[in-house]
Image (spheres, grey):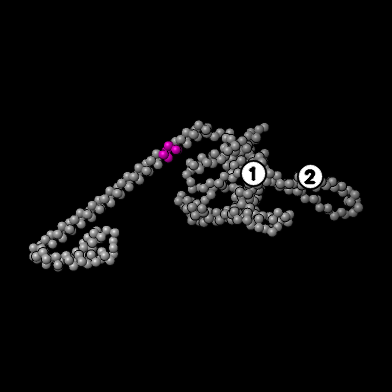
Amino acid sequence: MSAYATKLKQADLDDQDTDDEYTPLEIRTKVEAFQAEHGTTLSSVLMSEAFRWRLSQTDCQNRGYVLDGYPKSYKTAQEVFVVTPVKPEKAKPVAGEGEEDEEEKQPEPEEEEEEEAKKKYAPQFQKHIYPNSVVFLRGVDDEITHREELTGETSGERVDQLRQRLEKYANENDLSLFTNANKDEKFLFENAPVAHYPMNRFFQENKTEVFEIDHDGDKFEMFESMRVYIERNGRPFNYLSSVRSLNRKREGALTKEEVQTKEEIASKKEKSAEEEQKKKDHLCGLADGRLDMIAAHMHELKAARERHNMRQFLMKAIIPVLTEGMIDVWRVNPTDPVDYLAEYVFKKSNETRK
């Protein structure tokens, strides 16, 4: 019977009202027993065993899989992809009641040779479930929590829990762990303590190139870069879209991006032109107001001239201000003396009128 048919039969048994001929999965039994004794949170060892069981199933083996957010550390990666067989405990001798019991004891089997025992109980790398590609999304904790808050579906308590998980992940995968391990005085010695490394180290030890990318980039470019990385050794056959279909989607996305860029540029130019026109109108309004003020001032001067002769008028109204202005021009030494003098005279004229 094929594995698929076995699964269908097991599913039918799960749906039956009776427990006859029902065989629960071993991993399910372990999980239920652990939850009954410790609560809902599973240990990392049991969680890794559950992942290892799931990745060994037919669909994951034939069509591939995507693990999102697990494993979380070097330790959990080892628990998922490396299995160390457990040595059986030696049977303890039972106290005999007499010489007859000693005669009835069976002789113990010969002990396995040391080399064979090392091979038999050595850690076994689970190559059949090991991933071909590993993608690491870089991000700032504050940006991640802010992005979660923007969804509007996250409470303050969940955001705090997210911050705690991010802090724990950072502590378990900080690059300083490499430095701390190398600085240990017993580094590379047999009695050296177990070193703690970031999770990336596990995949590097198994000759897997880890692809790192920032999480806040353009989504299309991010997925396209990841696709190129995953297909670096050839395109997997797992019922994905054809290359032609992907190229069409890419061309459509690039065309859309080009149109959006042109629209943004046109919008910026239009907005800039509007701002320039507003500035021009404002300057024209100021100029018109200044001309009106000059006309009113000239009208007042004309009326004053009619009441005084020219010499008296100049000596009283013009010469003092002009003399002070010329002295100020000499003192300041501006780039444009004439314009400076005109501004000075105009300013003094306004002060006199007030």
Residue 319 seen from this side: yes
Does 4 lie within the magenta span?
no
Bin the neighbour count of mark 1 within 10 Å (Cα to Cα): few under 14, some 14-19, many 20 and up.
Answer: few
Bin the neighbour count of mark 2 within 10 Å (Cα to Cα): few under 14, some 14-19, many 20 and up.
Answer: few
- The alpha-carbon separation of the residues under discs 1 and 2 comes to 27 Å
Q: Quadrant of residue 120?
A: top right
Q: Which residues are magenta?
A: 253-258
Q: Position of residue 219 (x, y in %)?
A: 48, 43
Helix, strand or loop for the magenta stretch, by majority: helix
88 to the left or right of 17: right
Q: Position of residue 151 (x, y in %)?
A: 46, 49
Q: Amino acid at mark 2?
A: Glu
271 to the left or right of 212: left
Name the residue carrying label 2: 116
Does 254 lie within the magenta span?
yes
Residue found at x 67% / y 46% = 82
**Earlier along the polypeptide chain: callout 1 or callout 2?**
2
Residue found at x 59% / y 45% = 210
Measured along the vertical axis of the image, is residue 308 above or below residue 274?
A: below
Residue found at x 48% / y 46% = 217
Name the residue carrying label 1: 207
- How many marks on residues? 2
